């Protein structure tokens, strides 16, 4: 049995990601004790539920697994109760806003190391959480540059302990990266799904369309906040996609077989690189 990384781990938000953090940390022995904060009191949760301030005062490590629009309010409520050595990390998919809130609201912002585990699913809630959700998933750590190396290393050890492989980026680098790898693709899927025909013809849809549109099942309220808070980088990616789409439309209109095949082969090569 490994020695725990943390003595007292508090997970704020026990949805799919937060619940999986808590379950994974418990199963892998990453914390000696685990408590949760969640106003919905998830059914079947095996961890004691506490209030936010009580949990902040108790913990030596906190994982924020809340929607991006709740981060500032949660940090503001927790800040007076946090110990001077309590470490914080999170699961939010937009990092500049988290780094900014931590810098403004926390007495010891150097104890906060942002993280974005690139894992999840279209079915949220604690009932869909599982301890192996992060196995072999990438996790981008986003230290702001003021954190002592030992703090970043310890947070990295925790995320690696959950099964991820980690990379480090600045918050700004992360938000550009997330726009390319996640946020823009959600915009495309939502846009295409919004123009689908009626229910009768959709009964004939095969797995290709269903696979393509799976991410459009994401919670619209959650995604509105993510998209708005990273809108500049996302707009750049959508413009790049639009340029490629315009090229395809031109080739189709001209019946240009060579241009079409070259574009499709380039796209195939890009996908193959991702799967290596």
Image (cartoon, grey):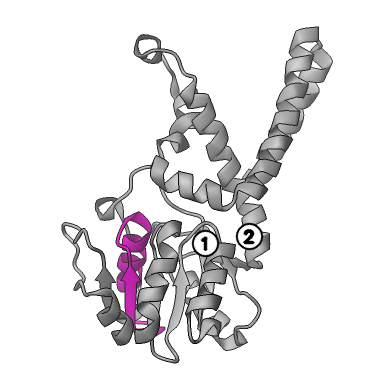
Compared to residue 258, the image places residue 264 above or below, namely below
Q: Residue at x 66, y 62 (%)?
A: 172
Compared to residue 183, the image places residue 213 above or below, namely above
Q: Is residue 218 visible?
A: yes
Mark 1: secondary structure:
strand
Magenta segment boundaries in residue numbering: 1-27
Q: Quadrant of residue 46?
A: bottom left
Residue 52 part of the magenta-drawn span: no
Q: Is residue 255 visible?
A: no
Left or right for 23, reference 239: left
Q: Nearer the viewer, residue 201 or 175?
A: 175
The picture places residue 173, in percent across and down from the top left corner, at 68, 61
Mark 2: secondary structure:
helix
Q: Quadrant of residue 142?
A: bottom right
Left or right for 89, reference 188: left
What residue is shown with label 1? 116
Q: Nearer the viewer, residue 22 or 78?
A: 78
Mark 2 and mark 1 residues within 8 Å of each other at the beta carbon:
yes
First in residue order: circle 2 vs circle 1: 1
- Quarter of the picture holding the N terminus: bottom left
The picture places residue 192, in percent across and down from the top left corner, at 53, 25
The picture places residue 215, in percent across and down from the top left corner, at 46, 38
What residue is shown with label 2? 174
* Separation of marks 2 and 1 at Cα, in angstroms: 9 Å
The picture places residue 152, in percent across and down from the top left corner, at 57, 80
Q: Residue at x 77, y 18 (%)?
A: 260
For this orientation, the residue located farthest to the bottom is 84
Residue 4 part of the magenta-drawn span: yes
């Amino acid at each position: 049995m490994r020695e725990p990384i943390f003595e007292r781990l508090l997970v704020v938000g026990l949805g799919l990601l937060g619940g999986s953090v808590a379950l994974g940390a418990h199963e892998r022995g990453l914390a000696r004790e685990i408590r949760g904060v969640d106003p919905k009191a998830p059914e079947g949760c095996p961890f004691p539920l506490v209030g936010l301030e009580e949990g902040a005062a108790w913990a030596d490590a906190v994982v924020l697994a809340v929607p991006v629009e709740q981060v500032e309010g949660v940090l503001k409520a927790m800040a007076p109760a946090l110990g001077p050595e309590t470490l914080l990390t999170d699961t939010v998919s937009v990092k500049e806003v988290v780094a900014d809130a931590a810098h403004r609201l926390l007495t010891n912002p150097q104890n906060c190391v942002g993280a974005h585990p690139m894992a999840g699913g279209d079915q949220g809630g604690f009932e869909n959480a599982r301890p192996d959700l992060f196995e072999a998933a990438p996790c981008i750590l986003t230290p702001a540059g003021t954190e002592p190396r030992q703090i970043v290393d310890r947070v990295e050890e925790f995320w690696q302990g959950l099964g991820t492989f980690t990379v480090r980026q600045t918050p700004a680098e992360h938000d550009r990266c997330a726009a390319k790898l996640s946020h823009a693709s959600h915009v495309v899927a939502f846009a295409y799904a919004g123009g689908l025909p009626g229910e009768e013809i959709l009964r004939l849809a095969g797995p290709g369309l269903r696979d393509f549109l799976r991410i459009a099942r994401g919670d619209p309220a959650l995604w509105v906040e993510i998209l708005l808070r990273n809108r500049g980088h996302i707009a750049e990616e959508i413009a790049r996609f639009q340029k490629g789409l315009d090229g395809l439309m031109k080739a189709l209109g001209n019946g240009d077989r060579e241009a079409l095949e070259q574009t499709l082969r380039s796209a195939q090569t890009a996908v193959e690189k991702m799967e290596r």
